[in-house]
Image (cartoon, helix red, strand yellow):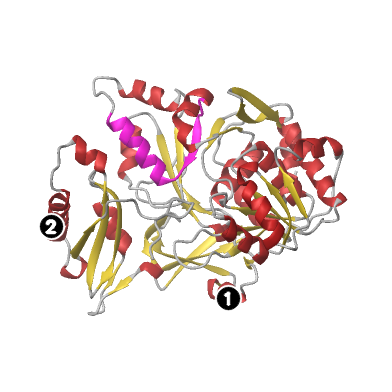
């Protein structure tokens, strides 16, 4: 069947995979499960609920951690012709209410871990007429509204508004259509067999998790296991024994430290089995830059890392490495539904995954979308085979007094190769380049380092030897605490 909307994807999943498990998750330490037919039935019940409240076509927000209730609520909203607005569960209530108002939300479905938000909207969001708890209300409402529900959907109609968690500036509401999301999830066949077990680790309000873990997962028929806490990743790896996971570089780097610090007398395949549950063979990395050396490091443990690249404004995947053509140093091959060109060193893309625009932000939309081309803000190039290489962020570019341009990411990536450097931010200060570093204090303690600043300065001195004068670092700040980060685990630059 032709797949052009999220409803097509849910229907396809039910028809193709039927009683196979779609989701597995823990309930009181036991594993519960829901099938592809369950997802179809329960999402239709949510669509019927929304219609019964007279909210079809309206904007409906979701807030909570990844759960089956969140997932079927999302599909019920979007497949019924309404607009889903996923909200970051970690934001303070005041910031959440501000986003709800900006997105013209008229109904909220919430996880009770954010009961404070449900209370806050009563006074701060007068346009929200209905507030539904995923725990107390939704199970009964699903039974009450059970039944078939179909409606005509235009693939190009607004499907979801996702707020960016940008490292600078005010978050923007990215408008994505059904076609944007459906094409991004279905355009590329990664040859992942149905029945493959995955573990969903990333925040579900972020499009990387939503599109790749959930939407694409339903289309290709994976068994998606839900991680209930970032603190229990290791335990859940052993419990669910995934074969494939999506991760951000921060998590990949922290896991590698556990692998590296294991007893060297134990064979690496046994260490990997202990850490990952015994069946993991592939990690898909996205969301930020990952040092290419990690591909080789994980290969020693029998695990392939596939690095990809994308952004919310592109639903999100722009390129990805392929299991059969994994090019170290690149962020993968351009998606088949996109075309790209380089304009003033900036990567620009065009195609069916590119957003409709920013909600109620015409000026910002006009600046980012030019004749259908999405200006990514990333500096880089493509090779002859359409593999993408990133060299830095345009808006982070340091322009020195002598006219030379320096990409801070280039310097950060090189220095972060040291085990001593846990986090780093490079910027211009008083006409010279400054590095602010949060050291890995566990590494410091383990190796008996008494003067951290001196060791870091030695590292910088070695780095400077191989750099042209204008790229050398002349100022160092040593942090005692981690940098403030977005919910996508990216350092806030300013």
Left or right of 92? Residue 437 is left
Which image quarter: residue 386?
Answer: bottom left
| Position in image of residue 32 (x %, y %) | 65, 25
- 474 left or right of 180 in image: left
Q: Is residue 251 magenta?
A: yes
Which quadrant of the figure contains the C terminus? bottom left
Residue 125 magenta: no
Relative to residue 421, is residue 328 drawn left or right? right
Residue at figure coordinates x 71%, y 57% from the top left: 122
Q: Secondary structure at mark 2?
A: helix
Depth order, front residue of 453/280? 453
- Above or below, 90 against 428 in this view is above
Residue 427 image point, x, y percent: 29, 66
Q: Which residue is mark 1?
A: 366
Can you identify the residue that label 2 sits on?
461
Q: Residue at x 24, y 65 (%)?
A: 434
Total labels: the figure holds 2
Residue 78 point in image, percent of width and height: 73, 51
Does 226 appear above or below 424? Answer: above
Residue 354 appears in the figure: yes
Mark 1 / mark 2, whichever is N-terminal: 1
Q: Which residues are magenta?
A: 241-261
Q: CA distance from mark 1 to mark 2?
A: 44 Å
The quadrant where residue 13 appears: top right
Residue sitting at 76 percent across and 41 percent down? Answer: 43
Secondary structure of the residue carrying tag 1 is helix
């Amino acid at each position: 069947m032709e797949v052009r909307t999220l409803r097509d994807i849910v229907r396809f999943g039910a028809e193709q995979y039927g009683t196979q498990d779609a989701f597995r998750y823990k309930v009181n330490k036991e594993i519960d499960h829901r099938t592809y037919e369950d997802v179809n039935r329960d999402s239709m019940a949510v669509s019927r609920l929304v219609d019964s409240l007279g909210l079809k076509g309206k904007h409906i927000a979701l807030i909570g951690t990844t759960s089956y209730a969140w997932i079927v609520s999302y599909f019920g909203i979007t497949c019924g012709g309404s607009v889903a607005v996923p909200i970051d569960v970690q934001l303070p209530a005041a910031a959440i209410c501000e986003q709800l108002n900006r997105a013209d939300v008229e109904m909220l479905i919430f996880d009770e871990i954010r009961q404070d938000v449900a209370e806050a909207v009563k006074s701060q969001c007068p346009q929200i007429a209905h507030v539904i708890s995923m725990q107390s209300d939704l199970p009964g409402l699903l039974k009450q509204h059970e039944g078939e529900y179909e409606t005509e959907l235009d693939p190009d109609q607004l499907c979801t508004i996702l707020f960016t968690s940008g490292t600078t500036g005010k978050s923007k509401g990215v408008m994505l259509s059904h076609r944007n999301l459906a094409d991004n999830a279905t355009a590329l066949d990664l040859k992942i067999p149905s029945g493959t077990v995955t573990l969903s680790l990333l925040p579900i309000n972020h499009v990387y998790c939503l599109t790749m873990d959930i939407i694409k997962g339903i289309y290709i028929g994976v068994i998606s296991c839900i991680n209930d806490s970032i603190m229990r990743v290791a335990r859940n790896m052993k419990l669910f024994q995934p074969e494939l996971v999506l991760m951000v570089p921060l998590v990949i780097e922290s896991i590698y430290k556990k692998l590296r610090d294991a007893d060297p007398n134990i064979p690496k395949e046994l260490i990997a089995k202990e850490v990952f549950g015994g069946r993991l063979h592939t990690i898909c990395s996205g969301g930020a830059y990952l040092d290419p050396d990690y591909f080789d490091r994980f290969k020693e443990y029998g695990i392939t890392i596939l690095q990809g690249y994308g952004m919310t404004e592109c639903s999100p995947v722009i390129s990805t490495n392929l299991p059969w053509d994994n090019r170290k140093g690149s962020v993968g091959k351009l998606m088949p539904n996109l075309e790209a060109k380089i304009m003033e060193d900036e990567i620009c893309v065009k195609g069916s995954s590119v957003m409709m625009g920013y909600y109620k932000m015409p000026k910002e939309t006009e600046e980012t979308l030019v004749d259908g081309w999405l200006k990514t803000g990333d500096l880089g190039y493509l090779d002859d085979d359409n593999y993408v290489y990133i060299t830095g962020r345009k808006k982070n570019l340091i322009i020195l007094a002598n006219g030379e341009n320096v990409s801070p990411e280039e310097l950060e990536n090189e220095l972060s190769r040291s085990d001593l450097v846990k986090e780093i931010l490079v910027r211009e200060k008083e006409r010279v380049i400054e590095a602010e570093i949060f050291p890995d204090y566990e590494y410091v303690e383990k190796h008996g380092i008494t003067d951290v600043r001196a060791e870091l300065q030695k590292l910088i001195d070695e780095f400077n030897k191989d750099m042209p004068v204008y790229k050398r670092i002349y100022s160092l700040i040593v942090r005692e605490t981690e940098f403030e980060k977005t919910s996508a685990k990216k350092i806030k630059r300013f």
